[in-house]
Image (spheres, rainbow, N blue to C red):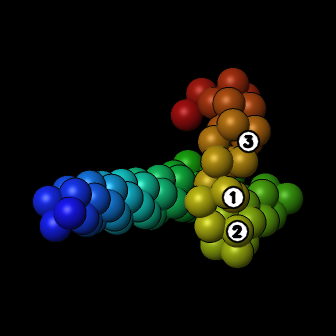
C-alpha cells in the first residue's frame, strides 16, 4: 500500500512541477511579448492623431491582450501604410 501511495504522490508532485514550470514559461513569454510590442509602438508608430499615445495606453492598461490586439490589428495596417 505504501508503494502505491508513494507512486501516486510522485505522479501528483510531477504534475504540479510541470504545471508550475509551464506557467512560469508562459508568464515570461507574455512579458517579453508585452515589452517588445511596447517598444515597437514607441519607436515605429507615428504621432499623428495621437495614435502612438492611444496604443501605448491600450497596451499598458490591458497587458498582453492589448499587445496581441496591436500585433494582429494595427501592426499589419501600419506596415502596409508606412512600410515599417
Marks 1,3: beta carbons within 8 A: no
Residue with the mark numbered 2? 62
In three-dimensional space, the C-alpha distance between marks 2 and 3, rounded to whole angstroms, equals 15 Å
Q: Quadrant of residue 60?
A: bottom right
Picture quarter with the C terminus = top right
Horizontal and vertical percent for residue 82? 66, 32
- In what element is the residue under mark 2? helix
Residue with the mark numbered 1? 66
Q: Nearer the viewer, residue 41 or 20?
A: 20
Q: Residue at x 85, y 59 (%)?
A: 49
Q: Which mark is residue 30?
A: none
**In this view, 4 is above or below 56:** above
Horizontal and vertical percent for residue 80? 69, 24
Picture quarter with the N terminus = bottom left
- Mark 3, other Cα within 10 Å: few <14 / some 14–19 / many ≥20: some
Q: Residue at x 16, y 67 (%)?
A: 2
Horizontal and vertical percent for residue 40? 51, 52
Q: Nearer the viewer's eye, disc 2 or disc 3?
A: 2
Residue with the mark numbered 3? 74
State the residue lying farthest toward the front: 1
Q: Earlier in the sequence, mark 2 or mark 3?
A: 2
State the residue lying farthest toward the right: 49
Q: Earlier in the sequence, mark 1 or mark 3?
A: 1
- Mark 2, other Cα within 10 Å: few <14 / some 14–19 / many ≥20: some
Q: Residue at x 78, y 58 (%)?
A: 51
Horizontal and vertical percent for residue 28? 37, 61
Amino acid at each position: 500500500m505504501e508503494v502505491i501511495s508513494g507512486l501516486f504522490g510522485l505522479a501528483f508532485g510531477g504534475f504540479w512541477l510541470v504545471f508550475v514550470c509551464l506557467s512560469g514559461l508562459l508568464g515570461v513569454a507574455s512579458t517579453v511579448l508585452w515589452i517588445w510590442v511596447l517598444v515597437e509602438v514607441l519607436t515605429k508608430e507615428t504621432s499623428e492623431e495621437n495614435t502612438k499615445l492611444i496604443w501605448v495606453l491600450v497596451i499598458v492598461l490591458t497587458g498582453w491582450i492589448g499587445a496581441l490586439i496591436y500585433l494582429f490589428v494595427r501592426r499589419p495596417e501600419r506596415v502596409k501604410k508606412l512600410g515599417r
